[in-house]
Image: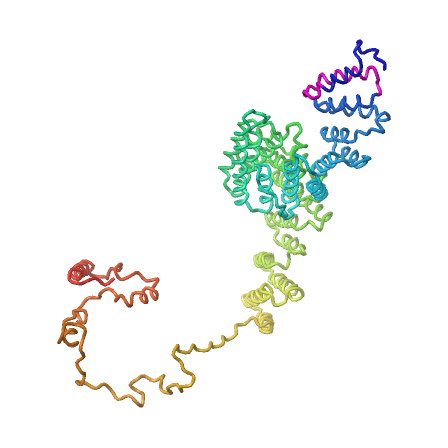
Amino acid sequence: MASGGGGGVSVPALWSEVNRYGQNGDFTRALKTVNKILQINKDDVTALHCKVVCLIQNGSFKEALNVINTHTKVLANNSLSFEKAYCEYRLNRIENALKTIESANQQTDKLKELYGQVLYRLERYDECLAVYRDLVRNSQDDYDEERKTNLSAVVAAQSNWEKVVPENLGLQEGTHELCYNAACALIGQGQLSQAMKILQKAEDLCRRSLSEDSDGTEEDPQAELAIIHGQMAYILQLQGCTEEALQLYNQIIKLKPTDVGLLAVIANNIITINKDQNVFDSKKKVKLTNAEGVEFKLSKKQLQAIEFNKALLAMYTNQAEQCRKISASLQSQSPEHLLPILIQAAQLCREKQHTKAIELLQEFSDQHPENAAEIKLTMAQLKISQGNISKACLILRSIEELKHKPGMVSALVTMYSHEEDIDSAIEVFTQAIQWYQNHQPKSSAHLSLIREAANFKLKYGRKKEAISDLEQLWKQGDLKKKKKKKKGKLPKNYDPKVTPDPERWLPMRERSYYRGRKKGKKKDQIGKGTQGATAGASSELDASKTVSSPPTSPRPGSAATASASTSNIIPPRHQKPAGAPAIKKKQQQKKKKGGKGGW
C-alpha cells in the first residue's frame, strides 16, 4: 500500500487517528488527518465521506456540498444523498433538498426524518403529517419523543395557518415542547383560556427541566422560556389585555434572546399595539423584523403580516412612497389579497386623492369579482364621505352576496329615504323579499322584511302596496294564533267515580244545601291546658286574638309557605312601616319581652 506524502505515517495509522478524533468529537483535527489520507488517494470514497461529515459537524455546509458536487462520479455508487440534502436544508435551499431526497436510491429512516423537516418548511403539512406518523409507528430508538414533538408541531401549524381542527393525537403532554405545541393548536381554534393553562404547565415543566440540568448542557437555558412567555403575551393581546401583553413583550426583548424569529414576532405584535400612536417606538421595533435569517424562521403568513404592518407604519409616519412600495410588492406576491389594495387606497385618501382611490378599488373589483365585496363596501364608504349617496347605493346594490341581507336592506332604505327616493327604497324591499321567497320562504328574515316593507309603505302613504304586503303576510301565517286553552288541573283528591258537586262554582251562601250558621250552640271542648280549662277561656287570654294586637312573626307551621310565595318581598322583620318607625320599634321591643319567640 502506498504511503507517499504521509510523512512516513501509514494509512491505517492515519485512519486510527481519524477514528480517535471522531470519538472525542474533535472534528477539526479529524478533518486534517482525512485530508492527509486524500493526499495519498484523492478518490478514496470512505475518506471523502468522512471529510463531508467533518465539514458538516463544523458547520461548513457550503464546503461539504462542494466536496459532494465535485466528486459526483466517484461517489455515484456510495450515494451521499442524506449529507447532500442536509447541507441544502441548512443552507435554506429547501426546494433543492426536496429534489435530492425524492431522487435518492434508498429511503432510509434518517432521510425520512429530513424529508419531514423539509415538508414542514415548505408548509406541506398534510404530507408532513403522513411522514411523521409513519416514523412514529415504525421507529424504535431513543428519538421517539422528538418525533412526537414534531408530529404535534405539524398539527399546531395546521390549526393556526390552515384553520384545520386539530385531531387528538393521544400524546401525553409530559414535556414542555409537547405542552407548547398543544397550546398553539388551541390558540388556532380560539380556545385562549385553555391554551393559557397549558402554557403555564409548559412553563413549569421547562423550569423543572432547567433546574435538573445541573451540568449546564443547555446552550441557552432562557430561550425556551422566552418562547413560552411570548406565546402567553400573544394570548393576553388577543384577550384585549394589551398593557399586560406589552409589559411581557418588553421583558422578553430585554433578555436579548438569540432567536431572531421570536424577536421579529414580538416586535411586530408591539407595533400592532402601538398602531398610530408611539410611532418612534414602532420605528425602533421594526428594525428587529429586518434581522438576517428572519425569512427562514417564520411561516409565510407571519412574514406577510409583518409586511402589512410595515406598510401601515410607513403610512402613519407619512412615508408615502415607502407605503406604496411595500403594498405593491405584497400585491404582486398575492394578487387576489385585499389588504395591499386597501392600504394603497387609504394612503391615497390621506393625500386627499379620493377619486384615485376609488378608481384603484374599482379596477381591483373588476379583476377579482369573487373577492370584491369588501372592496365595494370601501368604495361606497368613500362615496358617502364625498356626499354622493346615490352612487354609494348603486355600489352597495351591486354586491350580489349581500344585497338581500337585512342589514344591507336597512342601510339602503335609510340612505334612499335621506335622498327622498322612496321608489328605490321600496324596490330594495321588493328585491330582498323576492330573494327570500325563492331561497328561504317563511324564514324569520323573510317575514320580518315583509312586515317592515308594509310599515314603510304605510309611513309614506302607499296604502294599496302595504295592504298587498299584509295580505302576503296573512297567507304566510305569521299572524298570532289564539292560544288553545290548557286543560285544567284536577284536584289531588279527585275521584272519577264520584260525580262532582254541580254547585261547586257558587258561593257557599247561594248553594241550595246551605243552612246558615247556628249561633249559641257551640259545645265547650276540652283543651290541652290545665284540667278544667276551656277553649273559650284560653282564647280570651290569648293576646294575639285581640283586634289591637300588632302583627307577630308567622307561625312555625306557615313559615315555609310564606317564604316560598313571597321570595321577592322583604321579610317582615326588615320592613319599616311608613309614618311611625320609632313607635313601632318600641312596640316590638315590649312584645319580645313577654313572648316566647315565633321563629
x and y percent of residue 582 in the render? 18, 58
Residue drawn at x 26%, y 60% as measured from the top left: 575
The reply, left or right, for residue 550 in relation to residue 180 is left
Quadrant occupied by the N terminus: top right
Horizontal side, residue 365 vs residue 179: left or right: right
Q: Would you identify the image quadrant in which residue 469 lies?
A: bottom right
x then y, percent, for residue 250: 52, 31
Q: Quadrant of the C terminus?
A: bottom left
Q: Is residue 334 something one can see in this rendering?
A: no
Which residues are the magenta region? Answer: 20-43
What residue is at 52 percent from the left and 40 percent from the top?
236
Q: Nearer the viewer, residue 131 or 239?
A: 131
Measured as percent of width and height from the top left, residue 546 is found at 17, 71
Q: Can you give x and y, in whole percent of width and height, for residue 262 in the image?
A: 60, 32
Name the residue furthest bottom.
Answer: 512
Quadrant position of residue 413: bottom right
Q: Main secondary structure of the magenta part?
A: helix
* Residue 508 in view (yes/no): yes
181 vs 280, nearest the viewer: 181
* Magenta region includes residue 29: yes
